[in-house]
Image (cartoon, rainbow, N blue to C red):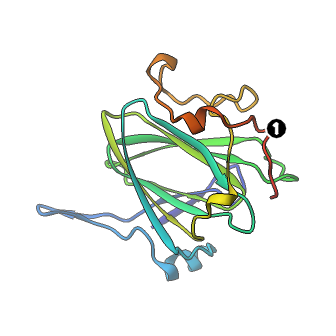
Amino acid sequence: MTVTDTFIKDLKIIEPKVFGDQRGYFFETWNKSVFEAAGINFVPVQQNESSSTYGVVRGLHFQLNPYSQAKLVRCVVGKVLDVAVDIRKGSPTYGKHLSVELSEENKRQFLIPRGFAHGFSVLSDYAVFAYLCDNAYNKESEGGIIFNDPELGIDWKIPQDKMIFSERDMNHPTLRDAKLNF
C-alpha cells in the first residue's frame, strides 16, 4: 500500500497493492497496522455505500464536532471525481480543495480527515461508492456547503445541465455562511 501526502495537511491518497490473476483480483482496503505504520490513526466504526448514475453530484457534506467523521472513500464500480474541502478554521489551506479521480480501474482511495467537507460527482454511466467512517452518523450534527460556491471554484467535470442533485444539497449555504466548529 502506498500512501501519498497532498498539499493539504492530513489529506492522503492511498494506492493499494493489488494482486491479480486469471480469477480476478484481491487487495486490502484497510489494515490497521499498515495505516499506523504510515502514521495514520484511522479506525472505522461504520461503512456506507451508495449507487448513482452519471451526473449525480453528492455533497458537500460534513458532520460537526463532536460527531465529525474521517472517511476512507473509494469507488467500487465506475468512476467518480471525489472532492475534499478544508474547513478547519486557522488551517493554512482553509477553503482550499483537492479533487481526486477514483475508479474501479485505479482502485485508489482517498483518506479525508475530520474537518473537511466531502462530495463527489459521477463521471461514468453508473457508480457504486463505498466509504468507511471513524465515527457514527449523527443527524443533528450534519452540515453542508453548496456545491457551486464561487469562492471554492470546484470543477465537478460534469456540464451544468447534466448535474443531478438532491433538494437538500441545493439548499446548503456557502462556506462563508456555513456553521463550522473545527
Task: Identify the residue at the far bottom of this view.
Answer: 33
Q: What element carries label 1?
A: loop
* Quarter in which the N terminus is drawn: bottom left
Q: Name the residue under label 1.
A: 177
Q: In this view, does 130 lie above or below 53?
A: below
The quarter of the displayed image where residue 70 is located:
bottom right
The quarter of the displayed image where residue 125 is located:
top left
* Quarter in which the C terminus is drawn: bottom right
Q: In this view, does 161 lie to the left or right of 24?
A: right
* Closer to us: 118 or 97: 118
Q: Where is residue 36 in the image (x, y as percent from the top left)?
A: 58, 79
Q: Which residue is drawn at 40% across and 57% down?
A: 49
* Closer to us: 91 or 15: 91
Q: How crowded is mark 1: few (under 14 residues within 10 Å), some or many (20 or more)?
A: few
Q: Is residue 68 left or right of residue 169?
A: right
Q: Is residue 158 left or right of residue 137?
A: left
Q: Position of residue 31 (x, y in %)?
A: 45, 77
Q: Is residue 111 above or below residue 129?
A: below
Q: Position of residue 46 (x, y in %)?
A: 49, 70
Task: Identify the residue at the far top of this view.
Answer: 161
Q: Position of residue 80 (x, y in %)?
A: 43, 41
Q: Is residue 167 left or right of residue 175?
A: left
* Closer to us: 13 or 128: 128
Q: Residue at x 50, y 77 (%)?
A: 34
Q: Residue at x 57, y 79 (%)?
A: 37
Label tally: 1
Which amino acid lies under the numbered mark 1 shown in the image of this protein?
Asp
* Closer to us: 9 or 47: 47
